[in-house]
């Protein structure tokens, strides 16, 4: 048996900038006496990110969830929104908080993104938008989705929590759809500890979003709409400005690790690497596999448990399906028979350790463990007797 790792190997580790550089930013903040409320760091990061991501408008938020929640609010959506059940709870919870009803659409078996071919049949008189997620950093079928939206006059919002810096057909990913949310949580490729942003093209949304994230305050005496507090503070923004300096290096390191995983895993029966559609780039946010019990000889859950003995802790992103949340049980679209692909994938996915600080040798060892844990068909048959 391969010896277990000495210290636990987690699914990810945050990107940390140079401590001395961050300390220098903190000194500037201390001198300025401005800790939050659209300070200098905030203004600079907003500008630097808009330039880095090539966004017409980019607004910062205290986290990705509040960015999405207020983005949906700013668009003034009503009724039903077609979305995916295979996502982090935040996506659908943002619908709940906007009094919007999710209509769950099944997913594509290759990318695990919303299945664009199944969207149209779910559109009703109440539908106002499509909320799709670029799952694990692999882009949705953006052009197909836009065509459906144009035909039925629907808004398109992307949960782009995982797609920092991704391009599709030579354009930044937020070029597609009306609005894209980015998450800058500590576990993301680019982080501001906690944080998020919205990228969009329509000028009139800019002021509305500034108001929504700051209690609807137009000035010290005028409250013009019902907002809340979703502002990014100066310490978060300064962190982001430093992480931005190292994000390309981080992405390159992950690119190299992905190649090692791919080289080894393609030779192990029953492990499928969840990939982008042909031609689309990945953000290198997560490295995810699907475990086929028949060919691999173990279920995903058995593999997950076995890896813990080697001190390896992947995550079941995403599990459970959002459509299984108790408060959706009466929705027709949440019924299991309507979501066969999502239902199968949710039992098979495993997000493997994937971050720049992980060594080449560690990834090779993890692949060796995955090989060691593969049970030959003969053994499975004997075991099942
Ligand atoms: N939409 C989608 C599709 C999303 O995936 C997310 C968030 C959102 C929306 C909402 O965006 P935010 O509001 O979060 O900006 C994590 C993250 O908290 C969450 O941001 C992320 N998606 C989700 C996929 O993963 P947990 O509960 O799995 O995180 P946690 O604390 O278990 O961390 C995972 C591993 O990372 C740990 O085992 C160790 C390592 N870690 C984590 C943190 C926080 C560290 O080494 N250091 C750290 O500081 O949710």
Image (spheres, grey):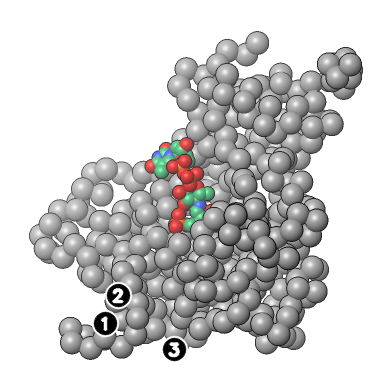
- Residue 214 point in image, percent of width and height: 29, 75
Q: Nearer the viewer, mark 3 or mark 1?
A: 1
Callout 2: SS = loop
| Figure disc tally | 3
Which of the labelled discs sits on residue 292, or is there none? none
Quadrant hosting residue 383: top right
Q: Is residue 268 left or right of residue 346?
A: right
Q: Residue at x 57, y 19 (%)?
A: 310
Quadrant of the image for the C terminus? top right
The residue identified by callout 3 is 204
Q: Is residue 213 or residue 24 the one in the foreground?
A: 213
Q: Is residue 58 left or right of residue 95?
A: left
- Residue 62 point in image, percent of width and height: 35, 62
Q: Residue at x 70, y 80 (%)?
A: 149
Graded by Cα atoms within 10 Å as few (under 14), some (14 to 19) or many (20 or more), the crowding at tag 3 reads few
Q: Nearer the viewer, mark 2 or mark 3?
A: 2
Could you tell me if the residues under marks 1 and 2 are in contact, i.e. CB atoms within 8 Å? yes
Quadrant of the image for the N terminus? top right
- Mark 3 or mark 1, which has the lower sequence index? 3
Q: CA distance from mark 2 to mark 3?
A: 17 Å
Graded by Cα atoms within 10 Å as few (under 14), some (14 to 19) or many (20 or more), the crowding at tag 1 reads some
- Residue 34 point in image, percent of width and height: 16, 65
Residue 3, compared with residue 180, is above or below; it is above
Q: Residue at x 60, y 36 (%)?
A: 352
- Residue 145 point in image, percent of width and height: 71, 73
The residue identified by callout 1 is 217
The residue identified by callout 2 is 214
């Amino acid at each position: 048996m391969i010896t277990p790792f000495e210290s636990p190997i987690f699914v990810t580790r945050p990107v940390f900038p140079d401590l001395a550089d961050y300390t220098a930013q903190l000194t500037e903040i201390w001198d300025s006496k401005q800790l939050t409320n659209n300070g200098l760091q905030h203004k600079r990061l907003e500008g630097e990110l808009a330039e880095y991501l090539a966004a017409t408008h980019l607004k910062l938020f205290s986290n990705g969830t509040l960015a999405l929640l207020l983005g949906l609010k700013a668009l003034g959506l009503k009724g039903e929104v077609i979305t995916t059940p295979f996502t982090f709870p935040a996506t659908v919870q943002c619908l709940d908080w906007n009094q919007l009803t999710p209509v769950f659409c099944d997913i594509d078996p290759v990318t695990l993104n919303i299945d664009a071919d199944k969207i149209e049949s779910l559109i009703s008189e109440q539908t106002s938008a499509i909320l799709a997620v670029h799952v694990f950093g692999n882009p949705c079928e953006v052009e197909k989705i836009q065509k459906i939206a144009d035909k039925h006059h629907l808004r398109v919002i992307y949960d782009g929590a995982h797609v920092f810096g991704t391009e599709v057909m030579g354009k930044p990913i937020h070029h597609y759809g009306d609005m894209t949310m980015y998450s800058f949580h500590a576990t993301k490729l680019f982080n501001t500890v906690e944080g998020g942003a919205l990228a969009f093209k329509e000028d009139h949304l800019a002021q509305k979003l500034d108001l929504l994230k700051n209690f609807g305050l137009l000035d010290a005496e005028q409250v013009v709409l019902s907002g809340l507090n979703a502002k990014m503070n100066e310490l978060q923004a300064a962190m982001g400005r430093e992480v931005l300096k190292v994000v390309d290096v981080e992405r390159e390191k992950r690119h190299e690790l992905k190649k090692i995983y791919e080289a080894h895993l393609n030779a192990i029966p029953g492990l499928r690497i969840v990939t982008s559609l042909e031609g689309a780039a990945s953000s290198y946010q997560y490295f995810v596999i699907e475990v086929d019990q028949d060919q691999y000889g173990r279920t995903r859950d058995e593999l997950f448990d076995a890896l813990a003995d080697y001190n390896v802790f992947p995550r079941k992103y995403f599990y459970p399906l959002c459509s299984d949340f108790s408060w959706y049980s009466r929705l027709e679209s949440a019924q299991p028979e309507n979501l066969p692909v999502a239902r199968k994938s949710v039992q098979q996915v495993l997000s493997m350790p994937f971050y720049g600080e992980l060594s080449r040798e560690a990834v090779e060892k993890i692949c060796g463990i995955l090989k060691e844990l593969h049970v030959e068909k003969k053994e499975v048959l004997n075991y099942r007797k």
